[in-house]
Every structure is written in structure tokens, then in C-alpha cells.
Image (cartoon, rainbow, N blue to C red):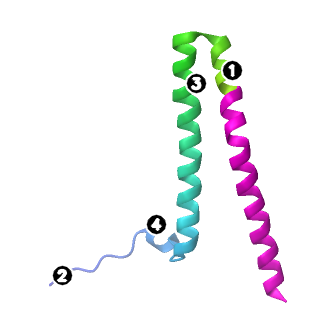
Amino acid sequence: MAESFPPCDWTLRMSRDLREYARQTNVRLAVGAVLILFIVGIGLIYSIYGPGAAMMGVLCVIAGLTPIILIVLSLAILDWIRKRANRE
């Protein structure tokens, strides 16, 4: 007969909320992409062209990410407002 084993500790803590899991995964992917962009991209610029070019690269990356961050922030605020309005 097959033995039944007690569930592992991590299975007891694991939630079945797939929306939360998807949100958490998307946040982790975005943070990982930004870290790779900064570490690898700016690191290569620094190693090839020097510190002055690396600082310009940092400024360009920040300037490029600013509109994206503003759009994501405004959508998050709109979602928060929508959730508060639906409570009533």
C-alpha cells in the first residue's frame, strides 16, 4: 500500500490566490529586469568607456524609466480609487 506523508511546511503556507501570485511574479520580473539593466548595462559602459560615460548612462536610464514609472504609478492610483469607490 502507498504511504501517505504529512504535508510539507511550505504547502501549508502556500496560498491559492492566483491573482496575488501573478502580481507578485510581475513585480519580481520588473525588479529583476531593472537590476539587470543597471548592473549589466551600466557595468559594461563603465568597463568599456569609463566612469563619465557610466554616469551619463545612469542619467539616460533614469530619464527613460521616468515616464514608465509615472504611468504605472498613475494606474495604481486609479486602481486604488476604483477599489475604494466600489466598497460603497
Q: Marks 2 and 1: which is nearer the front?
A: 1
Q: Type of residue at label 1?
A: Met
Q: Type of residue at label 2?
A: Ala
**Residue pictured at 50% horizontal, 71% vertical:** 14
Nearer the N terminus, badge 1 or badge 4?
4
Total number of numbered discs in the rendering: 4
- Vertical placement of 80 versus 84: above or below? above
Q: Nearer the viewer, residue 52 or 24?
A: 52
Mark-to-mark CA distance, 1 and 4? 45 Å
Disc 4 crowd rating (10 Å Cα; few below 14, some 14-19, many 20+) is: few
The secondary structure type at the circle numbered 3 is helix
Nearer the N terminus, badge 2 or badge 1?
2
Instruction: Identify the residue under disc 1.
Output: 56
Q: Marks 3 and 4: which is nearer the front?
A: 3
Q: Which x, y percent locates residue 3?
A: 22, 79
Magenta-drawn stretch contains 60: yes
Q: Type of residue at label 4?
A: Trp
Left or right for 55, reference 11: right
Instruction: Identify the residue under disc 2.
Output: 2
**Residue pictured at 44% horizontal, 71% vertical:** 11
Magenta-drawn stretch contains 85: yes
Disc 1 crowd rating (10 Å Cα; few below 14, some 14-19, many 20+) is: few
Q: Marks 2 and 3: which is nearer the front?
A: 3
Nearer the N terminus, badge 3 or badge 4?
4
Q: Which x, y percent locates residue 4?
A: 27, 80
Instruction: Identify the residue under disc 3.
Output: 42
Picture quadrant where residue 83 is located: bottom right
